[in-house]
Amino acid sequence: MAMSALRREGRRIIISPFARPAPAPSVAARSGIFCEDVNPDGTRSISTQIVRNRMKSVKNIQKITKAMKMVAASKLRAVQVRTENSRGLWQPFSALLGDVPSIDVKKNVIITISSDKGLCGGINSTSVKVSKALYKLTSGPEKETKYVILGEKGKVQLVRDSRKNIELSITEIQKNPLNYTQVSVLADDILKNVEYDALRIVFNRFHSVVQFMPTISTILSPEVVEKESEAGGKVGDLDSYEIEGGETKGEILQNLAEFQFSCVLFNAVLENACSELGARMSAMDSSSRNAGEMLDRLTLTYNRTRQASITTELIEIISGASALTG
């Protein structure tokens, strides 16, 4: 009776003149999945109850990661179709006005597009790293470079060491389904708050669920476009086109620059949202697999501990019976 009373919740307490006293509660709290009991040889006994609780926690985490993967997969298809359709908006502008990332101007504005939520791998870190490298390339003694950040995660990373260079920060742009009207209003707000010679948009272009490419799109101001066109620069030859109506060349370039920026920004936001969902799918799939592997290891540990406890009880029963008959 006394021996059975000492066995609770799968734990064993060995009564021996050489047994050490139980450790303090603070020591037991640091022991992870090990219980408070210490064997005479100094080794710790594993509590099956603690292992069962750990297995339950891992199962719950696995359910959450699988659900997040399914949600990301369901959203990805709809965003992917819209992203592919939006690529036809900015391609004519690249043919007309050009896209020259290497052009050297005095006032640069780097627009970093990131996500508002995490758990999507290194997609946001990639955008921030490219933005910082681009800032080093475009900054100089007679140059001015500022950041415009779209998304909470990019803001959190850039505000640590580039707070004074952040001109504008906008978050929760993906709270509602993205459309061109919403992005065009956003583009208009950016143009009203910054002065620029070149807008450089940093985003992740979607290729597949497991692959995205950091991309930089450059939009030049109307003055720079006209100057480069007259000097025979790398931008498109605007003089080969006939201008109809009463508008001047400068007014047409101004309208084209604003329309180009809204179209490129719309495509960039969709591309980045698509890459975010694909990266989240991959991250949650890896997390689910890792949780399954951890669950297998915990199950093996639990079975071994339970078997060792049963074996020890049988040995004690047989030893007690032998002592009574002897």
Image (tube, grey):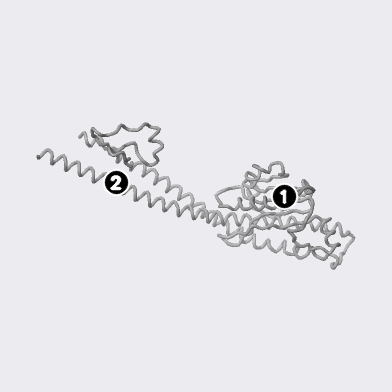
Give the residue at mark 1: 186
Nearest the camera: 38 or 207? 38
Single out the residue that lies furthest toward the right: 246
Which residue, given by chain and number where applicable, does mark 2 sit on? Answer: 306
Tell which of 319 and 239 is nearer to you.
319
Nearer the observer: mark 2 or 1; the answer is 2
**Percent position of residue 317, x then y:** 18, 41
Residue 315 lies left or right of residue 64; in this view the side is left
Of 307 and 179, nearer the camera is 307
For the N terminus, give its image quadrant.
top left
Give the residue at x 66% y 51%. Answer: 113
Q: Is residue 174 left or right of residue 49?
A: right
> Would residue 33 appear left or right of 10 to someone viewing this image?
right
Mark 1 and mark 2 in contact (Cβ < 8 Å)? no
Furthest residue toward bottom: 240
Q: Residue furthest left?
A: 326
Q: Say if 165 sits above or below 202 in the image.
A: above
Q: Quadrant of residue 93?
A: bottom right
The part of the image, by quadrant, that contains residue 22 is top left
Amino acid type shown at disc 1: Leu
Mark 1, residues whose alpha carbon is within 10 Å: few (<14), some, or many (≥20)?
A: some
What residue is at 68 percent from the left and 43 percent from the top? 162
Who comes first in sequence, dot 2 or dot 1? 1
> Does 45 sit above or below residue 112?
above
Real-space CA distance between mark 2 and mark 1, rounded to the nearest whole angstrom: 62 Å
Q: Quadrant of the rendered structure where residue 215 is?
A: bottom right
| Residue 44 as seen in the image, left or right of residue 130 | left
